[in-house]
Image: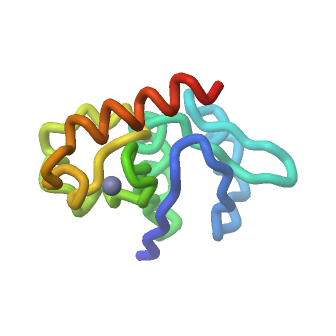
């Protein structure tokens, strides 16, 4: 079984020959294929449905999200809150930021930055 990490909304390539399964994959709500760029997955629900197909080919995709504060990649599978997470987010907090002292202020600042950026 091959495990591959992906990010929601960012294009990636499936390292398998999909053949007839291609049309099943692009029919999944939240999964898109852009010629030349690859596949994108919108959220956790789309990813679960995609994995149901890919597991037959020996491939599992795992989601990575971005820490809102520091921009680091957060590995959902290793998160201690994975059982209670709504999993429909693509921004999160990494472990280090979560347990840093002024996390609330940092979070507020990062949200403000994002809002005023565009
Ligand atoms: Zn962080």
Kindly identify the residue that appears in the image at 43 percent across and 39 percent down.
90
Report the front residue among 5 and 91. Answer: 91
Please determine whether, in this image, residue 104 is positioned above or below residue 8: above
Please determine whether, in this image, residue 10 is positioned above or below residue 54: above
Q: Position of residue 115 (x, y in %)?
A: 52, 23
Kindly identify the residue that appears in the image at 46 percent across and 36 percent down.
43
Kindly identify the residue that appears in the image at 19 percent across and 48 percent down.
82
Q: What scheme was used to colour the molecule? A: rainbow
Q: Split into 4 quadrants, where in the image is the N terminus?
A: bottom left
Kindly identify the residue that appears in the image at 49 percent across and 67 percent down.
4
Q: Split into 4 quadrants, where in the image is the C terminus?
A: top right
Q: Position of residue 94 (x, y in %)?
A: 28, 55
How many marks can you see? 0
Q: Residue furthest bottom?
A: 1
Q: Position of residue 26 (x, y in %)?
A: 67, 38
Report the front residue among 58 and 36. Answer: 36
- Residue 44 in the figure: left or right of residue 86: right
Please determine whether, in this image, residue 67 is positioned above or below residue 84: below
Report the front residue among 43 and 70. Answer: 70
Q: Position of residue 42 (x, y in %)?
A: 54, 35
Quarter of the rendered image showing ligand 1 = bottom left
The image quadrant of residue 36 is bottom right
């Amino acid at each position: 079984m091959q495990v591959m990490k992906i990010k929601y909304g960012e294009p990636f390539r499936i390292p398998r020959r999909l053949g007839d399964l291609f049309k099943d994959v692009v029919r999944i709500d939240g999964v898109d294929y852009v010629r030349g760029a690859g596949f994108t997955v919108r959220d956790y629900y789309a990813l679960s449905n995609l994995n149901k197909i890919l597991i037959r080919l020996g491939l599992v995709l795992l989601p990575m999200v971005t820490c809102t504060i520091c921009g680091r990649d957060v590995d959902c599978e290793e998160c201690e809150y994975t059982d209670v997470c709504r999993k429909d987010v693509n921004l999160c907090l990494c472990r280090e930021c979560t347990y840093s002292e002024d996390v609330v202020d940092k979070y507020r600042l990062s949200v403000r930055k994002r809002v005023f950026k565009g």
